[in-house]
Image (cartoon, helix red, strand yellow):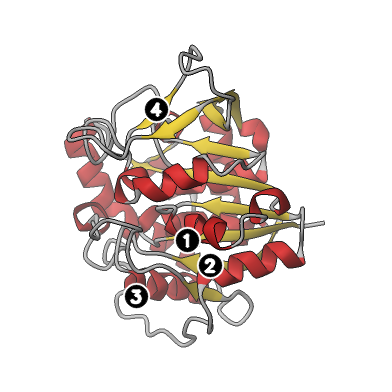
């Protein structure tokens, strides 16, 4: 039985790699891909998602459904410097989009699919959590009917990647993240920068992908990202943030998790979007999130390369 999955994306470079991994794995029944404002606008994220499905020749098999075009309470905040104006680092610029997004709204799609497949759906969230927060507000029973939620976002023991304390997805819509974390999901896993920064795609890995349309796309889309990563971190690599969340959905054994109480800061001059993890139970609140603390990075990278090279 393939795992029933909905991918929720703001398709930039690493979301696209996550989609490639999910679809090429052959182990996921991707019910649909929902899009949201984040790295780029909702319209651009949707266009990028459609292009990736065309690259995979799956545009007629997997639906793309548009969601929220702005955060719950805040102005939009894009990451063009990392992902480029188009979100894909300039790759696939000339590719025309043959199949548009499906009718309907992502929030309704998520609710309908979870209702239809109660207890079976894994939500892999690799974008700001606006769509899921809206879905929870619209249909609170979703919390108990979904199988699991895997969120790429946050950082609990390190520094942020958009402010000194905040990871991008949390920073863009911290109010949405707070709603999701406090909703009461029984199985919510946080795949944060603590582990994704250890899953680094290098030039050697890209060479190992061989010479195919997908391999060429990966090389082109990550080239500028690698330069930006080198400037900031002194390592020429592309951190596989979103693909690792997909990897966790494929194989939980890739990561070590511990359950903690986690909340998100929304009212701070310096720390908005910070994921606050109560390691010592200072707040005396019940643990609500499985926090990834370690990753078998080499094993994951092997999986990623093997899947995209196949």
Q: Are marks 3 and 4 in contact (CB under 8 Å)?
A: no
Which label sits on residue 276? 4
Would you call the spot at circle 3 few (<14 residues within 10 Å), some (14-19), or many (20 or more)? some
Residue denoted by label 1: 131
Residue denoted by label 2: 107
Q: Residue at x 39, y 27 (%)?
A: 276
Write down the quadrant of residue 59 in the picture.
bottom right
- In the rendered image, the residue lying farthest to the right is 1
Q: Nearer the viewer, residue 69 or 26?
A: 69
Residue denoted by label 3: 43
Considering the numbered disc 4 on the image, is that residue within a helix, a strand or a loop? Answer: strand
Gap between marks 2 and 4 measured at Cα: 27 Å
Q: Nearer the viewer, mark 3 or mark 4?
A: 4
Earlier along the polypeptide chain: callout 3 or callout 1?
Answer: 3
Q: Nearer the viewer, mark 3 or mark 1?
A: 1
Counting from the top left corner in percent of width and height, residue 196 is at 43, 36
Considering the numbered disc 1 on the image, is that residue within a helix, a strand or a loop? Answer: helix
Considering the numbered disc 3 on the image, is that residue within a helix, a strand or a loop? Answer: helix
- In the rendered image, the residue lying farthest to the bottom is 98
Write down the quadrant of residue 77 in the picture.
bottom left
Q: Are marks 1 and 2 in contact (CB under 8 Å)?
A: yes
Counting from the top left corner in percent of width and height, residue 43 is at 34, 75
Q: Residue at x 50, y 54 (%)?
A: 18
């Amino acid at each position: 039985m393939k795992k029933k999955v909905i991918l929720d994306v703001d398709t930039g470079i690493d979301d696209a790699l996550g989609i490639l991994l999910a679809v090429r794995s052959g182990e996921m029944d991707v019910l649909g891909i929902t899009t949201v404002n984040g790295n780029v606008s909702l319209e651009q994220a949707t266009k990028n998602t459609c292009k990736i499905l065309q690259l995979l020749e799956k545009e007629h098999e997997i639906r793309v459904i548009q969601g929220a075009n702005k955060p719950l309470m805040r102005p939009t905040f894009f990451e063009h410097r990392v992902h480029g104006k188009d979100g894909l680092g300039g790759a696939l610029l000339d590719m025309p989009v043959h199949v548009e997004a499906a009718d309907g709204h992502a929030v309704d799609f998520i609710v309908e699919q979870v209702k239809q497949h109660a207890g079976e759906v894994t939500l892999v969230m690799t974008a700001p959590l606006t769509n899921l927060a809206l879905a929870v507000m619209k249909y609170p029973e979703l919390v108990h009917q979904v199988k699991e939620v895997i969120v790429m976002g946050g950082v609990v023991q390190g520094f942020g990647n958009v402010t000194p304390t905040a990871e991008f997805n949390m920073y863009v819509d911290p109010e949405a993240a707070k709603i999701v974390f406090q909703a009461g999901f029984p199985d919510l896993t946080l795949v944060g920068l603590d582990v994704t920064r250890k899953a680094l795609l290098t030039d050697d890995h890209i060479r190992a992908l061989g010479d195919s349309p997908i391999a060429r796309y990966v090389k082109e889309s990550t080239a500028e990202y690698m330069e930006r990563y080198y400037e900031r971190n002194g390592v020429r690599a592309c951190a596989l943030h979103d693909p690792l969340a997909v990897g966790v959905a494929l194989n939980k054994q890739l990561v070590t998790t511990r359950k903690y109480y986690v909340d998100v800061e929304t009212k701070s001059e310096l720390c908005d979007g910070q994921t606050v993890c109560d390691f010592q139970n200072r707040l005396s609140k019940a643990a609500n999130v499985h926090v990834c603390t370690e990753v078998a990075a080499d094993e994951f990278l092997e999986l990623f390369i093997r899947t995209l090279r196949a």
